[in-house]
Structures are given as C-alpha cells and as structure tokens.
Image (cartoon, rainbow, N blue to C red):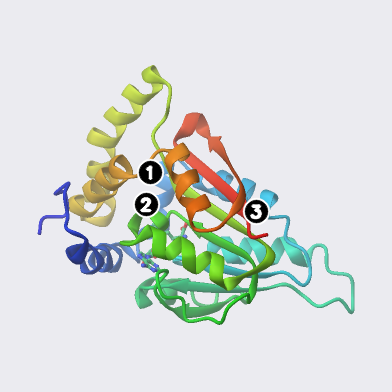
Amino acid sequence: VPFGQRDVAPEEKAPLVGEVFRSVATSYDVMNDLMSGGMHRVWKSVTIDRMNPQPGHHLIDVAGGTGDIAGSFLDRASLREPRGRKPADAVVCDINHAMLKAGAGRSPAARICGDAERLPFADRLFSHYSIGFGIRNVTDRAAALREAHRVLGYGGRLFVLEFSQPPQDGFRTLYDRYSDVVIPRLGEAVAGDRESYQYLVDSIRRFPGPEALAREIEEAGFRRVRFERFTGGIAVLHMAAKI
Ligand code: SAM
C-alpha cells in the first residue's frame, strides 16, 4: 500500500503506521523541529504548563515516542519537590520499540511497549494521561479514548496534543501549500523518506476538527472537555477530566 494513499482500510493501518515510525525513528526529533520550525517544543511546553506537574503525580504518556513530554513533566514536577515528598513518576508507552529505544536514558521515565487501544495497565492507575501527536495514528480512536478513561483515577486529567488545520481561510491556504510542497521534500532531504511524510500530511487532513474530537472525548466518558488552539490552529490541545 503506498504511504500517500488517502483511504487506507483500518486493518491495513496498524502495520502501515508501525512501518512509518520504524523508518523515521532515528531522524524523528530533527524532523519534528524542521517541520514545525521548532514550534512543537513551545506547544509541548504550554501543554506541560496546563498539566501543572506536582510531586505525587503519575503520568502515562501514550504514543510517547522518544519521551520528551514525560521528561519535561518530571523536570517540572521536580522543581516543586520539597524534601521528603513523594516524587512524580512517568511512564512512556509506545507501540514501537525503535522509538522507545531512541529515547532511552534521556529521562528517568519508565518505558513500556504497548498499544494505546489496549494499554497494559490496571484501572485508575494514573493522575495524568497525555498523547502528543499520536492519536491521529491510532486505528480505533474511540477505543484509545476509552482506555485513557479507564487507566485514569477519578479527578485524573486527559491531554491530547495534535496537529490540526487552521480555521482561518488565508492562513489555511498558506499552510496547505507548505504541507504539499515543503513537508514531503523535507522528509526526503532529511529522512530520505518522502512517502512517510506525505502520509503525515494526509493523516492531518483526514483527522477530525477540534469540535468533533471534543465530542469523541466526551463520548469516551470525559467531562469538562475544552480545547486550545496553538499557532493559528496548526496544533490543538484538548483537555478533559475524569470525574
Ligand atoms: N509523543 C511523541 C512526540 O510528541 O514527539 C511522539 C509522537 S510520534 C508522531 C507518534 C508516535 O505514536 C510514534 O512513536 C508511534 O510509534 C506511536 N504510535 C502509533 N500508533 C500507536 C498505538 N496504537 N499505540 C501506541 N503508540 C502508537
């Protein structure tokens, strides 16, 4: 199946996604910077602000890749760690070994290979669940959101950071042009892999808009769902609570 094909059947999507990330794992961090002009760092930093990490918090960062969200979460919580208080902890969970391996040793977060749709964890174990640029690649999004709800304790909070499409027409046109012309070429130049990056562009276009995703999050059982657009809507952070 060519990576750039727009209508990939669900049963073909899981191996396809695995292949895409195996081929880009090593150059992934560099590509993230190039593709977003470094903005993904700012979006992640604001996401960590919204999470407000504290001693005693337990984060699961699903589709965590090389684990930068979990690492920043722990760094931020440790700033608030008076002696004797239980530190925060974090688990990076990703379906792909190569991504976990590429990030090993970068932070004290645990790393576990697992599928967002069937998390290998007991119910109500975590206070925070994050998924950064990962939900778009999950085959059964409703199942992943139900799993997020299951592993969070009551009062637990969900954070979904994902690329989106700018709502404003003029900016949208520019962004579409950048996506069509620049991103696949950057993918070719930096990762030697044009098709994987064409797949990323196509998957962003197929992904539901923020309002529709907010409804899906609510259908999974979450409450107080809200979202915040970053950089004119190129990325969106959804936040919700299990109550
Ligand atoms: N969260 C990291 C970040 O923001 O830099 C990595 C994002 S990367 C674009 C997407 C990640 O999702 C990849 O590491 C991929 O292996 C993982 N992934 C895709 N499908 C998954 C699934 N069903 N369960 C868990 N991880 C998945």
Q: Is residue 100 visible?
A: yes
Residue at 68% x, 49% y is 50
What kind of element bears circle 2?
Answer: helix
**Above-or-below relation of 119 to 166:** below
Disc 3 marks which amino acid? Answer: Ile
Where is the N terminus found, in terms of image quarters?
Answer: bottom left
Ligand 1 lies in which image quarter?
A: bottom left
**Residue 144's spot in the image, x, y percent?**
43, 64
Disc 2 marks which amino acid? Answer: Met
Q: Nearer the viewer, residue 127 or 108?
A: 127
Say if disc 3 is inside 8 Å of ligand 1. no
- Label 3 belongs to which residue? 48
Q: Is residue 11 left or right of residue 94?
A: left
Mark 1 → mark 2, Cα distance in angstroms? 6 Å
Mark 2 → mark 3, Cα distance in angstroms? 21 Å
Q: Which mark is residue 31?
A: 2
What kind of element bears circle 3?
Answer: helix
Q: Nearer the viewer, mark 1 or mark 3?
A: 3
Q: Which mark is residue 35?
A: 1
Q: Is residue 17 left or right of residue 156?
A: left
